[in-house]
Amino acid sequence: MQTLLEQIAQKQSAQEAQLARIEQYTLLAAKQVLTAEDVVLLTGLKKSYLYKLTALRQIPHYKPNGKCIFFDRGEIEQWQKQNRVATELECEQGAIKHALQ
């Protein structure tokens, strides 16, 4: 009987954690101005690396009061899409086009 109660409690705890994650991602999806924690969730970057990128001015960010850091969702998504790598097919087509010139 005790084991069954423990299993139910574990399942309930797991479901509560899953609901909390769903709520967190739902709130994140509605935001345009992001905090560092939001960007960590959105990009998968480590928080320390994100702060390093801001210090090196390699990622667009805002400091309205000089201390708190904020990010624009569109700019972060654009930043993530920089330095696109061409597919093998695109490389082949470019090579053919160059050879025919």
Image (spheres, rainbow, N blue to C red):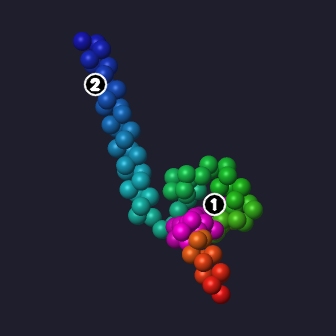
Quarter occupied by the N terminus: top left
Question: Residue 83 colored magenta?
Answer: yes
Question: Which is nearer the eye, 98 or 28?
Answer: 98
The residue shown at (28%, 13%) is 2
- Look at the numbered disc 2 and give the secondary structure of its residue: helix
Question: Which is nearer the eye, 39 or 77?
Answer: 77
**Amino acid type, callout 2:** Ile
- Look at the numbered disc 1 and give the secondary structure of its residue: loop
Tag count: 2
> In the drawing, does residue 11 fall left or right of residue 53?
left
* Disc 1 target residue: 68
Which class describes the residues within 10 Å of circle 1: few (<14), some (14-19), or many (20+)? few
Question: Residue 46 colored magenta?
Answer: no
Residue 6's label in the rendered image is none
> In the drawing, does residue 20 fall left or right of residue 78?
left
* Residue occupying the far left of the picture: 1
Q: Is residue 4 visible?
A: yes
The residue shown at (63%, 62%) is 69
Q: Is residue 62 visible?
A: no
Quarter occupied by the C terminus: bottom right
In this view, 98 is above or below 16: below
Q: Quadrant of residue 83?
A: bottom right
* Residue occupying the far bottom of the picture: 101
Which class describes the residues within 10 Å of circle 2: few (<14), some (14-19), or many (20+)? few
The residue shown at (40%, 57%) is 27
Question: Which is nearer the eye, 6 or 43?
Answer: 43
**Amino acid type, callout 1:** Cys
Residue 40, position as x, y percentages in the image: 56, 53
Magenta residues (range): 67-90
Mark 1 or mark 2, earlier in chain: 2
* Disc 2 target residue: 8
Residue 71, position as x, y percentages in the image: 58, 65
